[in-house]
Image (cartoon, helix red, strand yellow):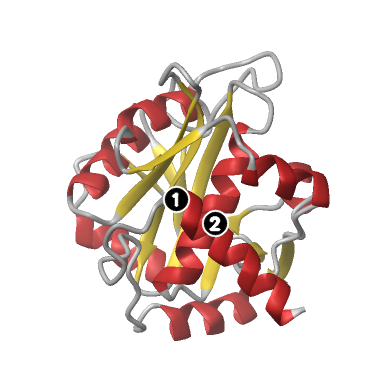
Amino acid sequence: MSANPPITIQDVLTAYAMGLFPMAERADEQAFYWYDPPLRGQMDIVGLHVPRSLKKFVLKSPFTITVDQDFPGVMAGCAARTDDRPQTWINDGIRTLFTDLYRAGFAHSVEVRDAGGALVGGLYGLAIGAAFFGESMFSRESGASKTALIHLCARLWRGGFTLLDTQYLNPHLEQFGAYEIPRDQYLARLHQAIPRPADFNLRRNPGLSEDQLVREWFAMRATNQ
């Protein structure tokens, strides 16, 4: 099924709650389509596989992490064509749709900046209840997207999220322990997560820095091992 904006925010939230998500076939196409694959990619918010070298890198990271400070910039980075990604599924319709969701408080971004403040990586996704749907990520410097993912998981853990959906599985996500489950199992998890309260913005933890947040996440993981 194809769709062309405008489409209401409630339409999108309802579709995601049913297990659907939108993608365009090409960036230069106007339409996007709703997908409902038989297998769904998932990541464990607490049990994310983090190699020791990556943990050390993140804890001594040269990057500065921000949240919801440059959503358009992150979307542009994710939509950019590169040598490794000559085609992208993020067209103008998808960008408009998620910009509206961001303005309404449902879509979020994690930004990774270098020492000079330039945006060098990040990711964005959609939060509904205790479910977070990861849409896309990008990296212009080594380790930037990996750092964004770890900070995302730390935030989801602290915010009370129970489901991190990656939609499809790819080799980049598999290195973090991502896996697939059948649609019926996914829907069961989704329907448990959607009604639960969660807080992406961590309103109960005012003043908590990104550095402290990720250190607490790593400490929690060490305690649970």
Towards the viewer: 207 or 69 = 207
Q: Position of residue 28 (x, y in %)?
A: 44, 19
Compared across the picture, whether 208 is left or right of 145 comes to left
Compared across the picture, whether 102 is left or right of 183 comes to left
Query: Is label 2 in a helix, a strand or a loop?
Result: helix
Does residue 102 show up? yes
Task: Classify 89 as above or below 101.
Answer: above
The residue positioned 50% from the left and 23% from the top of the image is 114
The residue positioned 39% from the left and 43% from the top of the image is 109
Cα–Cα gap, marks 1 and 2: 6 Å
Task: Classify 24 as above or below 194.
Answer: above
Towards the viewer: 103 or 140 = 140
Task: Classify 82 as above or below 162.
Answer: above
The residue positioned 64% from the left and 17% from the top of the image is 86
Asked where in the image residue 56 lies, by quadrant, the reply is: top right
Three-letter amino acid code at disc 2? Answer: Val
Q: Position of residue 11 (x, y in %)?
A: 25, 60
Q: Which residue is mark 2?
A: 214
Query: Is label 1 in a helix, a strand or a loop?
Result: helix
Q: Position of residue 179 (x, y in %)?
A: 75, 63
The C terminus is located in which quarter? bottom right
Q: Which residue is mark 1?
A: 210
Does residue 36 show up? no
Is there a contact, CB below 8 Å, between mark 1 and mark 2? yes
Q: Position of residue 47 (x, y in %)?
A: 70, 69
Three-letter amino acid code at disc 1? Answer: Glu
Asked where in the image residue 142 lies, by quadrant, the reply is: top right
Instruction: In the rendered structure, find residue 14 and report the number of the disc placed on it.
Output: none
Towards the viewer: 10 or 45 = 45
